[in-house]
Amino acid sequence: MNTRNEKTKVKKNPDILPAAVSDWINYAARHGTSNCQIHAVLEFQGHLDAAKLAEAVRMSVDIEPILGCRFVEEQIRPYWQRLVDIDDIKLCSLEETRDNEKTLRRFMSQSFDEKHDTQVLVKIIRSGENDTICVKMDHACCDGGGIKEYLKLLSAIYTNLANGVRFEAKPSSPGKRDQSCLFRDMGIFNLKRAWNPQLAEQKPTWAFPYLLCQPAEPQFSIRKLFSRHVHAISTYAKKKCATINDILLTAFFRALFEMVKPYPGVPMELLLTVDLRRYLPGGKPDAMCNLSGVASVRTARVYMESFEATLLRVVSQMKTVKNNHPGIYSAIFFEFLAGLSYREVLQIIEVGRLQSIISGKCSPALSNVGLISRSPLQFGDIAVRDAYLFSPAFYAPGFMLVTGTYNNILTLTVSYYEPNINRVDVEQLLSLVSAELIACCDT
């Protein structure tokens, strides 16, 4: 099959939608990088109407057509194909339990049926008088920014149904899921001229502690800081002319310095995920999609250095990063990959993974998703009291810390595989990061 024929096929068949190169890369992650599943957890005080939530999820699959598709791995140019039996798929299920945490983790550990499931599945977990819902989404169709937008959509549909009001929304345009809108709005028309290899990712310098062995089931760890500390962190950041992201990055660096103990004076790299929606005029693309980039920050360990001193160095590093449109260069690199076949992209990903295994180095990543929602999410007359995200579970040596805030609660999560990554090490990291954040507030 050649590229020209594939493109013609995509245009002529309404049930076949084009796959952006970022979709390729995130789908390919399941072949050795991660389990490719993002989860959003919403906690309620009270019970939702399970039938109305199921109806809302079904409606969302029509409003965002990509959610009702499966990814077809063609060797030249993969594509999305609309499922014909969506109404036969159980998109939303209810389970009553006495052990909310165990049920939640079991659902998050379950994999999609790649050939038959939609790109979103929702579980209502009912424990006593309260409900928790978990939204499972395949990273191939969207990123953390996309799932945040989906939560708002689901909330709006459910609320209208609960109030007996018809929800009116035109289906999004699935043909506008690539990065073209980003480059257009930024005035980037010549990608080769815009490319600066000096701003691309560099060779990794370290890794989170791990063992090379056969991975078992995915595991999930979580830690929370509540309103008193969140407010204190915000006050401290303003006082030091820093952002919350700077504070989180500093705490992550210092926790890793304590655990890994790299040689002092040698710059260590952390990767930052960047929501590229920030560069769009409305802050939102025309359809649910993957629109994220990566930026690199390097800081050396300094023996017995204070939090404030490390923060000053991180803030200085981040100013340089911000002056060079963080995340854009990884987006341009993705666009270069679009000129290759899917088979060639898979080979590049595999080479990168082998290099990290051979070197024993893979830069840890921080994904600060920021505010889950600027205003409280409502499902009818029931407000979401807490909300947080989990990244895909990464295979070692990959490692990602996710942070996000909702209702003045800062949540830190890590998704990983044991025994490659030891739960004790992950819990130690979360304790160290939390302790660094709390300590900086008290200075």
Image: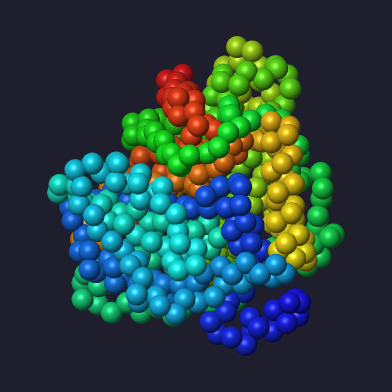
Q: Residue furthest right?
A: 193
The residue drawn where x is 56% and y is 68% is: 71
Q: Is residue 425 visible?
A: yes
Q: Is residue 243 visible?
A: no
Q: Position of residue 83 (x, y in %)?
A: 47, 76
State the residue in front, 47 or 325: 47
Q: Position of residue 103 (x, y in %)?
A: 29, 46
Would you identify the image quadrant in which residue 269 lies?
top right
State the residue in front, 288 or 302: 288
Q: Does residue 413 appear left or right of residue 336 in this picture?
A: left
The residue drawn where x is 35% and y is 50% is: 107
The residue drawn where x is 20% and y is 47% is: 97
Would you identify the image quadrant in which residue 299 lies?
top right
Q: What's the colour scheme?
A: rainbow
Q: How many marks?
A: 0
The residue drawn where x is 33% and y is 31% is: 228
Q: Position of residue 261 (x, y in %)?
A: 62, 18
Q: Residue furthest left?
A: 129
Q: Residue furthest bottom?
A: 12
Above or below — where is 144 with respect to 170?
above
Look at the image and tell me in which quarter the N terminus lies.
Answer: bottom right
State the residue in front, 235 or 135: 135
Q: Residue furthest front?
A: 214
Q: Position of residue 373 (x, y in %)?
A: 40, 53
Q: Does residue 303 appear left or right of residue 62 in this picture?
A: right
Above or below — where is 263 with respect to 32?
above
Q: Does residue 18 appear left or right of residue 334 in this picture?
A: left
